[in-house]
Image (tube, rainbow, N blue to C red):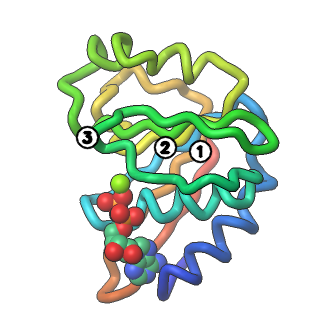
């Protein structure tokens, strides 16, 4: 679908949030600037996260409290699966928290099979989003 503005993303994210169950993983694909973090912020609002959701590009992993615990991870800067282990990535994924993962490509073949795949593409000033549940 087409998300024409940040406010469309906000609306879509809030509406999508109730689909997510505790322990589920949401992977966000798309180039820098595609709107991955904006989408995580929007879904997190719908999950009852009230504090500001900021990009974990440097922190690598942020934790929030919504109606379930929420982790937001950004793998852009990691070199591979070893660093994911060190940053507590597996612990987050194996917990009952809802996990959002930007740049999931960095995990190569180690990505859990059961997950939501959210793909964002630039479409002029808008963004194109596709959603798939893998199981
Ligand atoms: N649906 C949208 N329509 C227009 N601009 C958007 C949309 N979603 C996000 N943006 C803008 O795109 C820029 C990058 O967003 P961001 O979420 O940081 O991307 P990413 O995390 O993929 O690098 C921001 O300026 C943001 O406001
Ligand atoms: Mg981002």
Q: CA distance from mark 1 to mark 3?
A: 19 Å
Say whether marks 1 and 3 touch (CB < 8 Å). no
| Horizontal arrangement in the rendering, residue 34 relative to residue 129 (left or right) | left
Does label 1 or label 3 sit earlier along the sequence? 3
Residue at 25 percent across and 40 percent down: it is 76
What's the mark number on residue 116? 1
Q: Is residue 57 above or below residue 13?
A: above
Q: Is residue 128 visible?
A: yes
Q: Does residue 127 show up?
A: no
Around disc 2, counting alpha carbons within 10 Å, would you say few (fewer than 14), some (14 to 19), or many (20 or more)? Answer: many
Residue at x-position 26% and y-position 59%? 31
Identify the residue at image location x=25%, y=60%: 32
In the displayed structure, 128 sits above or below 106; it is below
Disc with the residue nearer the chain's start (2 vs 3): 2
Q: Residue at x 76, y 33 (%)?
A: 22
Compared to residue 54, the image places residue 90 above or below, namely above
Quadrant location of residue 122?
Answer: bottom left
Residue under pointer 2: 27
- Distance from disc 2 to disc 3, alpha carbons, whole Å, reads 13 Å
In the image, is the residue at mark 3 within 8 Å of ligand 2 by its beta carbon? yes
Are circles 1 and 2 on residues that touch, CB within 8 Å? yes
Which residue bears the numbered disc 3?
76
Disc 2 within 8 angstroms of ligand 1 (CB):
no
**Left or right of 87: which side holds 70?**
right
């Amino acid at each position: 679908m087409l998300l024409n503005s940040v406010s469309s993303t906000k609306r879509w994210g809030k509406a999508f949030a109730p689909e997510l169950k505790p322990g589920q993983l949401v992977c966000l694909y798309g180039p820098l600037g595609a709107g991955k973090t904006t989408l995580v912020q929007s879904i997190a609002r719908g999950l009852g996260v009230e504090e500001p959701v900021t990009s974990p590009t440097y922190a690598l992993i942020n934790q929030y409290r919504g109606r379930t615990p929420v982790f937001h991870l950004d793998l852009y800067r990691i070199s591979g699966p070893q660093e994911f282990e060190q940053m507590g990535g597996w612990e987050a994924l194996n917990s009952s928290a809802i996990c959002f993962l930007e740049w999931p490509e960095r995990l190569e073949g180690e990505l859990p099979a059961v997950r939501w795949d959210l793909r964002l593409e630039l479409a002029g000033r808008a963004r194109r989003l596709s959603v798939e549940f893998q199981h």
